[in-house]
Image: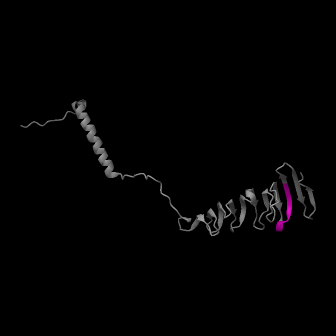
Amino acid sequence: MRKTSVIDFKKLFRHPVALAILAVGGGALGGFVQRATIPTVFAQAEPRVIQASRVELVNSAGKRVGILGVDENGGIGLVFFDPHGKKRAEFGIGRGESPRLDINGPEGDSLLSLDLGQHFKPRLMMSDHDFNGRVYLGVAEPDAPSPDWKYDAWVLRFRGDRGQPLATIGMTTGGVGGVTVLDQAGRRWQTPLKE
């Protein structure tokens, strides 16, 4: 009768050469299985650049909800639309390289605007549906560009219907302040800005 040999694993794991052979073989088998089942991804030496003049964001129904890119006037911005297609918010840089932020009402009209005015002075304008510019905070600017204008009077101005001035609180950069208030009859109370 033939004798079958039985491997004594306790003795095998105590033998250093056998242990090394099992470790190398197990590692090779694990590497083979890993390469066969998981795809290899190589890192790119240089990042790729995607160039586009406009990217449109759409919802799951394919309706446009946002735009990132250049508009028809040459401005650059990020615009968001409501479900009815009305522009509701916009952040960008206009053609004059002045940054702006606009928040619009349900009809698409600007209700809050933050931008840089003439000579890159900041201004905040709040409006309602009836009149644009009910509340203005920023540097007082002339109605028409003027080289003699100092751009040093900072104001908080309130306007009524049809642009009628109601109240202005202001100060110059030299530290002189003033207040102007008008009542419904058009009477004026004023402490003018004087240096």
Q: Is residue 182 left or right of residue 3?
A: right
Identify the residue at image location x=64%, y=60%.
Answer: 92
Residue 105 position by quadrant? bottom right
Residue 187 position by quadrant? bottom right
Magenta highlight range:
161-169
Asked if 44 appears above or below 94 in the picture, the reply is: above
Seen from the viewer's position, the closer of residues 183 and 2 is 183
Asked if 4 appears above or below 78 in the picture, the reply is: above
Identify the residue at image location x=84%, y=52%.
Answer: 171
Identify the residue at image location x=82%, y=59%.
Answer: 149
Q: Magenta stretch: residue 9 in it?
A: no
Q: Is residue 59 left or right of residue 29?
A: right
Identify the residue at image location x=33%, y=48%.
Answer: 34
Q: Position of residue 25 (x, y in %)?
A: 26, 41
Residue, far left: 1
Q: Quadrant of the N terminus?
A: top left
Q: Is residue 67 visible?
A: no
Seen from the viewer's position, the closer of residues 51 and 84 is 51
Q: Is residue 136 left or right of residue 77?
A: right
